[in-house]
Amino acid sequence: MRYLITAAVTLFAALAGPGARAGEKAEAILDQHVLPGMRLLAERTADLDATAQVDCAPKSEDLRAAYGAAFDAWISVSHLRFGPAETDTRGFALAFWPDTRSMTPKTLRAMIAAADPAVDTPESFATVSVAGRGFYALEYLLYDPAFTSDETADYSCRLVRAIAVDIARNAAALEADWRQSYADKMRHPSAEGPYQSEEEVLQEFFKALVTDLEVDADMRLGRPMGQIDKPRPTRAEVRRSGRSLRHVVLSLTALRQLSDLLSADDAGLSTRMDKDFDYALSRADKLSDDPALAGVATPQGRIRIESLQQAIRAVRADANQFMGPTLGVAAGFNSLDGD
Amino acid sequence: MTSRRGFLAGLLATGVAPAATWADVGAPAYLSAAQGADGAYYLLGVGPEGGIRFRQKIPGRGHAAAAHPQRAEAVGFARRPGTFAFVLDCLSGDTVAELSSPEGRHFYGHGVFSRDGALLFTAENDYDNARGVIGVWDVRAGYVRTGEFDSQGVGPHDVRLMPDGETLVVANGGIETHPDSGRTKLNIPVMQPNLTYLRQNGSVLETVELAPALHMNSIRHLDLRADGLVGFAMQWQGGQGTLPPILGVHQRGAAPRLFGADPEVAGQMNGYGGSVSFSGDGRHLAVSSPRGARVQVFDVASGALAQVLEMEDVCGLGAAPAGFLASAGTGQVAMLEADGRHPLGTADVRWDNHLVPLHT
């Protein structure tokens, strides 16, 4: 009998399904996750800009601290790559990665060699290739010995400041767009807007969740892991600043909050996802002595990184299998998995 | 009684047998990969009316296939980033050859035979160098790899033989991937897709790019008209904010023309073109979008939208005398004609992305 009741309750919940609380969930995601994250990004990048104008020396502790805090804020919202992040290629201008053809160092070197005057105004710097802008370009200038020598210090200083201004301006525009316009479009779906129903709004957030889990497992970890006989430690994201593992943890932490908000009305699902995230974060904890993921090149290190990768894939598999259906994500044979 | 199959096998053993022709396997008009109700994957021959003419099991989920011009022999490719392809005798179901991509390469899922059937060309990824290549295989020698040449772009996807029987046309989708990071896209902000015409020795005849603002529009799938007009379907990688057209045509030496630029028309397709096909009479060009659950049909001469047909999870498209044949992941097959969609029933399979035409 007990089982029958459970079945009936489950069925009822499924029928009540996405519609009933979709609006509340979307509001909560916007108010507790998106807008605070964007506000923090705008504040921290403004700090970075102000700090760089005072002290542009690559080894400046203040500058490096401001850079790290701003980058943290970006990684915590970097899964929100739709809407405002797509406008004016803001997302790519803030974060050009991966860089499979070393376009970032090439662009920076060319600018330094030519003492490119594009650094003189924010407007002209905004026309520079996205490969020469944003957090990843700044990492070279602050942490790569090839870029921190004294010979070109004067121009490099102007370049650091130009990148910091550009980051702050892009982040401010991104935050303003969310606050003044895009959040409302998600709160009030309509036939004329980008979202026609609350389900579509939640599906957008769900897509952001599973896509970024894939970025963590396949790009942040998969690229440096390479093949077992051909590890690629120099492919680790932001290894120069030793932030590689930190980005995975920041991403998982942000995605966990998003996952909680998406499954707020389903205790069973919420518990399952929490358990998955806890396990993945516990695997990351075990890597705390390997911040740049250099361990991919050693058998022991590799096993630990692989176990984190598998744990993240398990989060994603459960999100697809158990959360997707509650949000009305249809698993079309062709529509889901294009080619 | 000697069965026909036994008789043929006997002849094959003597080495004097004419190999089975497409007529021997029910004269299909198309090949398609699919998943059966049993969960297994199949390569199917599809008749011009949408019926299944033959069904042969394959080792994993397929994408597209290449049909030998005479023999009932098909090359099935594993989905990208597969390193494996197999040559199927469509009469017996036997695998008559297996192809492994060379070290450092994987298949993209499309390939095409030379007109005489002596060579097979396969779209491949030289992934450590982020370079597209066309692999060349000697069919008569038993599908032996004999060489490769540059596809002149990143991420070559569909490849076809032009009606002149000589020129290859390649859709270089522009998207860089590497097996180490699965199917994640590595170069979206700097991708540069193109359409390239090549001789069979790899020399370049013509390369066509779209306007810079469309550099995130991945050119992926092709269909050809008898006069050499190339229809191409694209997949937009620039987000859902402003959706561009996903369909175009190109004639050698001329500028490409894009169809469906009207924001409302483009918006229906979610920026995703699945398959492209000319109609049987060549006057119309259709593009399917499983994500938009629609097929749009355009008048080729004027570029005007002629028809929109809704169909859940539709992807496969092929030419039919009075329009198009369409297949969907739901198993549905339909004929699309001027007066609308005519359902031809639902097969017990989930049709995969493409209906590959057999030009026999």
Image: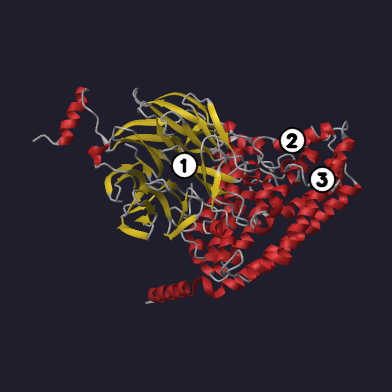
Q: Are marks 1 and 2 on the same chain?
A: no
Rendering coords of residue A4 (x, y %): 38, 75
Residue A186 is situated, as x and y percent measured from the top left of the image, at 63, 67
The image shows residue B182, relative to residue B21, as above or below, that is below
Q: Nearer the viewer, residue A48 or A125?
A: A125
Marks 3 & 2, CB-CB < 8 Å contact: no
Q: Is residue A13 above or below residue B165?
A: below
Residue B156 position in % (x across, y down): 52, 37
Task: Single out the mark in the foreground, 1 or 2.
Answer: 1
First in sequence, mark 3 or 2: give its number. 2
| Residue B331 visible in the snapshot | no
Secondary structure under the numbered disc 1 in the rendered image:
strand
Three-letter amino acid code at disc 2?
Answer: Pro
Q: Residue at x 69, y 35 (%)?
A: A102
Q: Residues within 10 Å of mark 1 (few under 14, many from 20)?
A: many
Between label 3 and label 2, give the one nearer the viewer: 3
Q: Residue at x 37, y 27 (%)?
A: B143
Circle 3: residue type: Ser
Q: Is residue A264 left or right of residue B21?
A: right
Instruction: Please indicate whether residue A181 sits to the left or right of residue A204 in the image.
Output: right
Residue B222 tag number: 1
